[in-house]
Amino acid sequence: MDRADQKKIINMAFVERQNKPPTHLNKETIQMPIKDIIWRHVTLSGEFLNDKNIILDNQIREEKAGFLIYTPFKILDSNKIILINRGWYPLTNSRKDILDIPPIKEMQTIEGQVSQMPSSGISLGKVVTEKLNESSFRLQKMDYEVLSSLISKDLMGYEVKLRKPIFDKTYVVDSGTPVPDSDKNYGYAFQWFAMAFTLFIIFIRLGVKKK
């Protein structure tokens, strides 16, 4: 029950922030703590660093295997860099196929949503960076230390999900709430309460029979 209530609070905060006007990320506002900007709609101007695309492997959408594509974005008049989540793509026929990621050139103003980087469970061993070509790297897990050493020490610790695709034909955006709905937790709670009540009735009946 407590976990269900926690989920409701998180998702309510998400909806509230989604309804606020966009924040413009620049060299001043980018210094805001992530707790104050998470889930907010943002606009940002700058340029994409097309030589450091990140492919995050093993991402499942609707029971289909695929991956997420990230391209670093340098904020205008700042050294700060943010990873831009360009969306989910289905897995190709072979893992050996090198994905052609179209570069996004010139100065851009984009819209997106601030989000935490995807996290995974227990990681066994060091996170391996697999270089696919001169501009693309494949990772099995988003590790900030690995990413900052690969891209820049000025890399921010969060990502921005694009609201709409930029030069990407196959694109799926994850626009759901940050945590799963709490109905499942309430269902589990009902099952446990029902089990406890059943056991209590059995205990009473057995006690009456002994007497």
Image (spheres, helix red, strand yellow):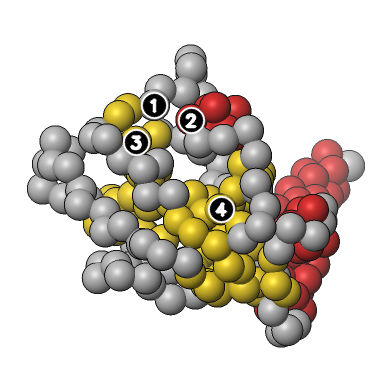
Sequence-wise, which precedes: disc 1 or disc 4? 4
Residue 9, percent from left and from top: 80, 67
Q: Measure how far apart labels 1 and 3 are at the Cα level.
A: 6 Å
Q: In 3D space, how far apart are the residues under numbered discs 2 and 4 (Cα atoms)?
A: 15 Å
Q: Between tags 1 and 4, which lies in front?
A: 4
In which quadrant is the N terminus drawn? bottom right
Of callouts 1 and 3, which one flags the residue occurring earlier in the amino acid sequence?
A: 1
> In the orientation shown, which residue stands out farthest toward the right?
211
User: Which of 185/133 is in front?
Assistant: 133
Q: Which element is circle 4 on?
A: strand
Q: Is residue 179 above or below residue 158?
A: below
**Disc 3 residue type (three-letter):** Phe
Badge 2: residue crowd in 10 Å (few <14, some 14–19, many ≥20)? some
Which residue is tagged 3? 137
* Residue at mark 4: 74
Q: Are marks 2 and 3 in contact (CB under 8 Å)?
A: yes
Badge number at residue 129:
1
- The residue where tag 2 is placed is 150
- The residue closer to the viewer here, 200 or 75, is 75
